[in-house]
Image: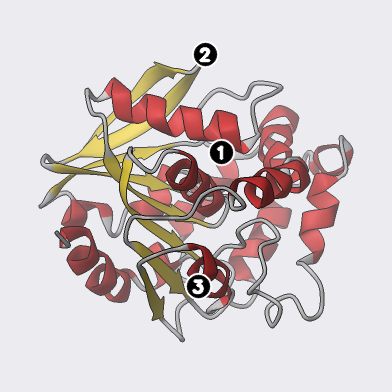
Amino acid sequence: MREQRIRVNGIAMNVASAGAGDPVVLLHGWPHTWRVWSEVLPTLAEEHLVIAPDLRGLGESDRPATGYDLNTLADDVLGVIEAFGLTTAQVVGIDLGAPVAFFTALRNPERVRRLVVMEAMIGTLPGAEAFLKTGPPWWFGFHAVPGLAETVLAGHEGDYLDWFLRSGTLGRGIPASMRDAFVAAYTGTDRLRAGFDHYRAMRPNAELIAELVKKQRLTMPVAAIGGATVGEATAGQIEPIADDVHRYLIPDGGHILPLDRPKELLEILVPFLRRP
């Protein structure tokens, strides 16, 4: 395993990598870092060059004041791919990383050969009505208010993140050491602010997605994977706008599938990423 800081798109991104061969980029969510992939990364690295960055503003990557729109985040992903001397890759995203993976593939289909999205909402695309029947998760609104959440939560980061990591299926499967690493990554007002900036960009990012799907479809093979939290909502959003969708469900899987159900996830990822 190698971990390094790479200058990409005007910022320094923290990037872990391992293995060699057909490249796969893994994009985490919040409150994760690249380490959310720790249980599946070694197996994937047996056949692939696996590249796992901390997203802009998250983990140990730089936390700029701007750039949380999907166009910039997609440019970050493509910049990481290019930093390894590559032109194309397969891209996998979970939680907040899934819309980034999706938008990168939709906007740049010649650069993304296969796409995997899991346990996430893709903007406000139709198809997730059952999941949203009681409204979006409450923290989406709390995190989106400029300046509020980081002010209220400073000094109580561990308590707040523990709610996510211990509530139902949201954080199931996370060992204590991983919990401590995640809390450390988001302790401090500026670290919190950068994380919440991703939520503050959700509304304009949903508009970017809605406009782009009017013009383009996903033409590469796509795997949509659900667990017990989001379930089949992601697949429901993807299927109408993609040519080749593979729907998977791990019904007893916690939201953070790479940690809660790594074996079952690998049983999906390994053959899908081998596809011709």
State the image quarter where residue 167 is shown: bottom right
Q: Name the front one of labels 2 and 3.
A: 3
- Tag 2–tag 3 contact (CB < 8 Å): no
Density class for disc 1 (Cα within 10 Å; few <14, some 14-19, many ≥20) is: some
Residue 23: percent from left, percent from top = 21, 42
Density class for disc 2 (Cα within 10 Å; few <14, some 14-19, many ≥20) is: few
Give how far apart the Cα atoms at labels 1 and 2 are.
21 Å
Tell me the residue that label 3 is attached to.
Answer: 235
Tell me the residue that label 2 is attached to.
Answer: 10
- Tag 1–tag 2 contact (CB < 8 Å): no
Residue 125: percent from left, percent from top = 66, 63
Q: Name the front one of labels 3 and 1.
A: 3
Density class for disc 3 (Cα within 10 Å; few <14, some 14-19, many ≥20) is: many
Q: Quadrant of the N terminus?
A: top left
Going by the numbered disc 1, the residue's amino acid type is: Ala
The residue lying at 39 percent from left, 30 percent from top is 78
11 in relation to 168, above or below: above
Give how far apart the Cα atoms at labels 3 and 1 are.
30 Å
The residue lying at 59 percent from left, 46 percent from top is 183
* Secondary element at image label 3: helix
Tell me the residue that label 1 is attached to.
Answer: 185
Most foreground residue, 22 or 157: 22
* Secondary element at image label 1: helix
Going by the numbered disc 2, the residue's amino acid type is: Gly
Indicate left or right for 18 with 228 as reference.
Answer: left
